[in-house]
Amino acid sequence: MFGFVACEPEPDTTVKQTLTLSVDNTEIYANGNQTATFTVKDDKGALVEDATIYFASTNEALASNKFTTSFAGTYEFYAMKGNTKSNTVSVVAKEVTEDTKVVTLSVVFPYDYAFVGDTISFAVDCNGDDVTSQSIIYNAEDDSALDGNTFATTLSGEYTFYAIYEGEKSNSVTFPFVVTDTPPVLLSVSPSTIIADGVEKAIFTINHEFEFEVYNAADDSKLSSKEFSTTEAGVYTFYAICNDEKTNTVEVTARMKINNEPKPIEIEASVATIKANGVDYTKFTVTEDGANVTDSSTIYVNGGVLNGNRFKTTTPGTYTVYAEKGTVKSNEITITAEEVTATGKTIVFAEGVTLTSGWYDVNKYLRGDNGDIQMCWAASASNIIQWWQDRYVAHGGTLPATAINGPSTKTYETGCRYQLALMDMFHSEWDNSLGGHVHESVPWYFEGKLNGGEYASPGSQAVPLSAGGYWKDEWDDIVDDMYCGYDYFSMDTFATAYSYTVRYNNYDLWGNGSPLLGVERLKYFSDLTVRAFEHGMASLTISLAANIYSLHHAVTLWGYEIDNATGLLTRIWITDSDDMESEPKTEILHEMTVSIGEGQSHIQFSSPDIRYKNVWAVAIVPVSGPFSAE
């Protein structure tokens, strides 16, 4: 007889260990300061101190049970001890902006836990400032406020705290208090940050009088002493062996030695030869280790300080140029200013514009009987936008379907029409009962931005009734950095060729209180006009009053004439929405002479054929794009 025995495996009586990972702060700010602290416990709730924390995405181990970062994002972690893996927890590192108020609470105590009866201290930081004395610290268990910034207890356990500063809540900090007859051996180091110069040292100590030895945790190599120094920057982790027991770990940060010795600087010029006509110029650039440090340097021409980094002159000759940054002097270069022998004048028009074509002249309806009496700004903006769109198409672009383009198709009661459909749009999409600004209406049309108009006092100027942004969906793909913001421009602002609308209030340069008079005043205005047409064209704000404080009016500037020898404007060409008083109105390009007004303090434009005869400069509003003057 054969006996068959069915063999079943013996029941597995081994109890598998479980690990539970938790974190005190599931959200921190990515400022490199706020910390998320992890705790690992076994299935009995006992603390597991020798578990290792890992990034879930890369399986890289953390150097300790704390996590901090300068990069915003969501991070996941798990813990391991042996072959046992814990659950996964997430920490969100929130982005820090200039306006973010980051309040960070930390415990000031030499060890990771305290004994019952010990007193721990807290520190509160807000964006790098110590605000401990202005903050209130709370025990999170019952939200009770501490008396000051210290805490002590007679009961063991984990205690969680947070702080409030100016209404902002900090991160949470959990700190354990334990009861023991024999305190464990704890390793500490001071200072925890040293310079990696091979000289500065970090000193290790323990909280007992026992002998101990210090080890580098990276390779378990023993240090020859209880001191550490290095010439290589990095973060180093150490532990100690005392009475055959391994202690906690501590970190030492070795920072790169900062070289405070000044570095050499170098100056170079965009061109070495210019014409001595007061218009032609060379631009200087100062570099330090390849970095542009022009703004923080002082440039000298023939021993005198140059205002800015552009040099022009009316005096022929050779000029020696160098720069200084602090105590460091650059190389010397020479610039030659050649004598101007050419005479005559040069006429410049915006790209695509001639005396007979390419320009626009939107006129108001009658005497403003349909409510457009204040809309000279809209007429000038319409001229500019239509010109801009013409140039965009001429350069190979395709207008978006939302663009307002071409002549008006709307007929008013008398049978009259605006010259451009854009003026119809401004008439219906803006509150046209008040005066407005070209530098706001142009970016509103393209991007839906007001360029500072959103900060105007209510009832002080025209405001849009709709969102605008007729090119908004395509704008970012057309030209990078096209819009440069609501800033007064200087001569250097035009270095950015694609700033499509900026505003300059000339009261700062040739208005009331300006030190510029006479020829100097006209020269600066001439330079600004030349600069504007290097990248596009401009709207011009004029005053019908000689004191330029009232009766402001917007016209469109299409071209200019300049004296080659002096660099001064002699004529300009404009279109004006108010130049005719009766229908039917026709397009006219007006020629005006440029001069210095009485008193030498204002720039005057004159024409016997224009309605106002004499007007005065108030502001220039450059509108630019990827084009240049012809």
Image: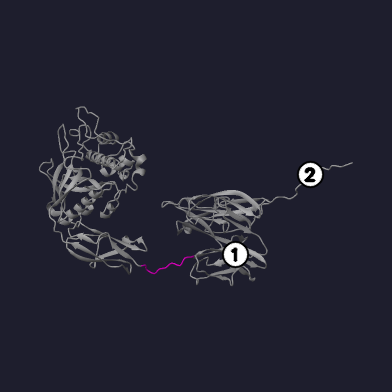
Placement of the N terminus among the 4 image quadrants: top right
Residue underneath mark 2: 8
Q: Is residue 511 visible?
A: no
Residue underneath mark 1: 219
Q: In this view, does 602 lie to the left or right of 292?
A: left
Q: In this view, does 169 lie to the left or right of 221?
A: left
Q: Position of residue 424 (x, y in %)?
A: 26, 33
Seen in the picture, residue 61 relative to 210 is either above or below; the reply is above
The colour scheme applied to this rendered structure is one colour
| Residue at point 70%, 50% (across, down) | 16
Which of these two is toward me, 335 or 42? 335
Disc 1 marks a residue whose amino acid type is Asp
Give yes or no for residue 567 being in the magenta stretch: no
Q: What element carries label 1?
A: loop
Number of numbered discs: 2
| Residue at point 16%, 35% (across, down) | 586
Q: Is the magenta stretch mostly helix, strand or loop?
A: loop
Seen in the picture, residue 109 relative to 616 is either above or below; the reply is below
Contact between marks 2 and 1 (CB within 8 A): the answer is no
Q: What element carries label 2?
A: loop
In whole angstroms, how far apart are the C-alphas of marks 2 and 1? 47 Å
On residue 606, the disc is: none
Q: Where is residue 37 in the image (x, y as percent from the top left)?
A: 56, 55
Q: Position of residue 541 (x, y in %)?
A: 21, 45
Disc 2 marks a residue whose amino acid type is Glu
Which stretch is magenta?
Answer: 255-263
Which of these two is toward me, 442 or 401? 401
